[in-house]
Amino acid sequence: MDLIKRFLKEEDGLGTVEIVIILAVLVSIALIFRNTIIKFVQKTLESILQGSGDAGQIDSNGVEPK
C-alpha cells in the first residue's frame, strides 16, 4: 500500500507532459495561422533579398562608385 501512495505522489514525469502539451499547442497555432505565417515569411525574405541588390554596387576598395 505504501508503494502505491509513493507512486501517486511522484511528480518526476510532470515536466515531460507539460512540454508535450506546450508543443501540441504551438503546432496547433502554427497550423491555424499557417497562411499568415507563410505570407509574413515571404514578404520578409523578399524585403531582405531586394535590399541586398545595393551591396553589389560597391567596388573592390569598399567604396561606392559615383
Image (spheres, helix red, strand yellow):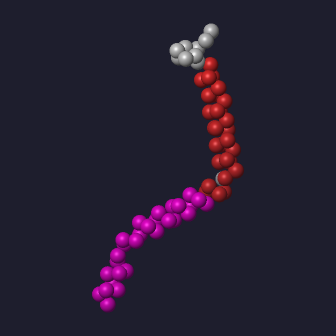
Magenta stretch holds residue 26: yes
Magenta stretch holds residue 10: yes
Q: Where is residue 60 in the image (x, y as percent from the top left)?
A: 55, 17
Most distant residue in the top direction: 66
Picture quadrant where residue 47 is located? top right
Residue at left offset 35%, top offset 86%: 4
Q: Position of residue 18 (x, y in %)?
A: 46, 65
Residue at left offset 35%, top offset 81%: 7
On screen, 15 above or below 6? above
Q: Residue 58 or 1: which is nearer the viewer? A: 58
Most distant residue in the left direction: 2
Picture quadrant where residue 24 is located? bottom right
On screen, 51 above or below 5? above
Magenta highlight: main SS: helix
- Part of the protein shown in magenta: 1-28
Q: Is residue 2 left or right of residue 28?
A: left
Q: Residue 17 or 53: which is nearer the viewer? A: 53
Residue at left offset 60%, top offset 23%: 55
Residue at left offset 32%, top offset 90%: 1
Quarter of the C terminus within the rendering: top right
Most distant residue in the front direction: 60
Q: Where is residue 30 in the image (x, y as percent from the top left)?
A: 62, 55
On screen, 38 above or below 15? above
Q: In this view, does 22 lie to the left or right of 14?
A: right
Most distant residue in the bottom direction: 1
Label total for image: 0
Q: Residue 63 or 10: which is nearer the viewer? A: 63
